[in-house]
Amino acid sequence: MERIYLNDGWKFTEKFDERMVRRNFDESGLKEVRLPHTCKETPFHYFDEHVYQMVSGYRRRLFVPEEWREKRVLLTIEGAAHESTVFLNGQKIGEHHCGYTAFSIDLSESLRYGEENILAVRVDSRESLNIPPFGHVIDYMTYGGIYRDVYLEVRNPVYLKDVFVRSEFTSERDAVLISEAALNEETQGYVIRQSMRKKGETQSVPLGECKAEAVTKLSFPVKNVSLWDVEQPALYEIKTELVWQGRVLDKTVTVFGFREAQFRRDGFYLNGRKLKIRGLNRHQCFPYVGYAMPESMQKRDADLLKRELGVNAVRTSHYPQSHYFLDRCDELGLLVFTELPGWQHIGDAAWKEQAVENVRDMVRQYRNHPSIILWGVRINESQDDDGFYVETNRVARSLDPSRQTGGVRANKKSSLLEDVYTYNDFLHEGDNRGCEKKSAVTSDVTKPYLVSEYNGHMYPTKAYDCEEHRVEHALRHANVMDALVGEEEIAGGFGWCMFDYNTHKDFGSGDRVCYHGVMDMFRNPKLAAAVYACEQEREPVLEVASSMDIGEHPGCHRGAVWIFTNADSVRMYKNDSFVKEFRREDSPYRNLCHGPLLVDDFIGDALERREHMKPAQAEKVKTVLNTVARFGLGHLT
Ligand code: GAL
């Protein structure tokens, strides 16, 4: 079944006009736009969130051929911020109350066949809406507009509404492939058939078939599968077909990975192997266009995380993100912790009902991605609310028995209804421990524990801050990462955050930017990015943290010079004369594979060679000179 993308040919207005839903509306005052679209392009910084708060309108002509009359025509809007009402030929046909999940509407009954139809969408991006994440302050901008793809599907009258695939292992490489295939309506005489092939291969293996029901449960043993892993993320395509009297009437291809992802008391296990989670948090925003970036840029962020920053995991803070991003995480073997939309605030009963609906949509829409290893079912950093969170946990577990739940909190020893205690640990201040002990935080030490954020507001850093500040920023990331690796009982952590982002007036540096990223808003790496990059071993990294210009430092004291590298050793030369070799095992960071190396010698044997000093004398003078260079004459140790 092909998708017909409706990304081109839209007309837009910043002020929704009720008449624009009608067929005979004069479109000449509307602006031509393409999707993904932001309702307002913004400056880089110093702008107010009111600029994108509006009730905007989108309108598009849609010619519907006569042949579609016998079909089901489904419209899907992948993401519109934040509340949408959809009209077809003047009639309201659907609404959706979440800016971060997709929604589909069956247009079939309302379409005019063999002629042009008018599709219109009213999009409300006001922050006064009584839906998540609104209701209090939020440390990120929420933007507006139809910012993800819109497409049509033309399907058989009886069609596969949803296919959920998971697996259970019977031995290391053998599994049972378990699927639930839901039809749009109950029916008789249909058969569901499945086959499987490795992605990229042409040969499919038939799995089997059975009689179709409203929800058909299929389960087939599969032997000797290649595993989806962080190193080699093998993907399979599971083809599910709806067959009637030998004819295939509908089909869905689900990209799937066989893997066992499990948080245990002492950490995270992927395919039975303990793996320390080394991740970063990602928002979905970009400069100028807010959320409105296409497939290529969504995928590029995943590439940057895996290939340039070298992390093995990402948290999609604080909402479900583009499927393109997730698809790429699947392909790259990048683990994902995804969560429902929200930030600190829990609203009234209607608000909570919508949040539960958001969990339902999130799990249904994202549960086939092998990269997702954990559902976040608490509003980020909200207070305990057992009634509410019993329900979000129940919904996630009932729709996906294959994944555990977590829920990000900022408080210790809170009510643990989830499988994993996920906590934002901002203990580190530069000169103290890198993280809390698990036992100091969790309310049940027998359950798994994961750090969902660290650093961030503890040390905002601009890409163009002075060297000492940027070095301190990088070292703080190294300090926490090192501490997390040292804690056997902690599954790992996600640094705050991948890149700088625009934010509300209550946060950030007064210019509506939170400079919390290890990259800037354009994804240019700051020094701290190298600390992450060093932990991967695919690409060589060598970043000298200092330009060694004395004028950059107070009192012209160069301070400590650090080398970030994943090399086994680095040899330093001064004017082509060898000074010293710094080895990986010299790093004071004992837990990291490639911790920062401290440069403690700028002289080497130059005093003996060039000044003809005796070895003992040279050693003493060298110590003095190196100490002066680092601390200054007034601060000699
Ligand atoms: C956390 C919050 C994040 C971000 C971060 C800044 O409390 O969850 O969204 O605001 O602080 O460090």
Image (tube, grey):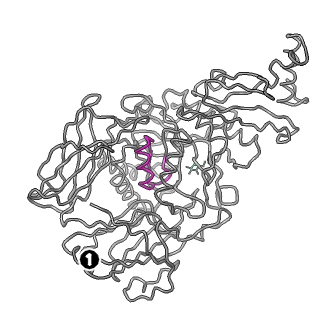
Q: In the image, is residue 614 above or below residue 73?
A: above
Specify the quadrant that holds the C terminus: top right
Q: Which residues are magenta?
A: 315-338
Residue 461 placement, left or right of 139: right
Q: Which residue is drawn at the image coordinates 36% and 47% (left, top)?
A: 369
Mark 1, secondary structure of its residue: loop
Q: In the image, is residue 593 above or below residue 188?
A: above
Amino acid marked by disc 1: Pro
Q: Position of residue 8 (x, y in %)?
A: 43, 71
Q: Which residue is drawn at the image coordinates 74% and 48% (left, top)?
A: 465
Specify the quadrant that holds the N terminus: bottom left
Residue closer to the observer: 406 or 59: 59
Residue closer to the observer: 577 or 284: 577
Q: Position of residue 251 (x, y in %)?
A: 23, 56
Q: In the image, is residue 500 above or below residue 479?
A: below
Is residue 382 visible from the viewing direction of this image? no
Mark 1 within 8 Å of ligand 1, using the beta carbon: no
> How many other residues sit within 10 Å of disc 1, few (<14), some (14-19) or many (≥20)?
few
Residue 327 belongs to the span the image colors magenta: yes
What residue did someone put label 1 on? 65
Q: Position of residue 377 (x, y in %)?
A: 41, 49
Residue 435 placement, left or right of 190: right
Residue 85 belongs to the span the image colors magenta: no
Is residue 77 visible from the viewing direction of this image? yes
Residue closer to the observer: 88 or 576: 576
Q: Which residue is drawn at the image coordinates 83% and 40% (left, top)?
A: 553
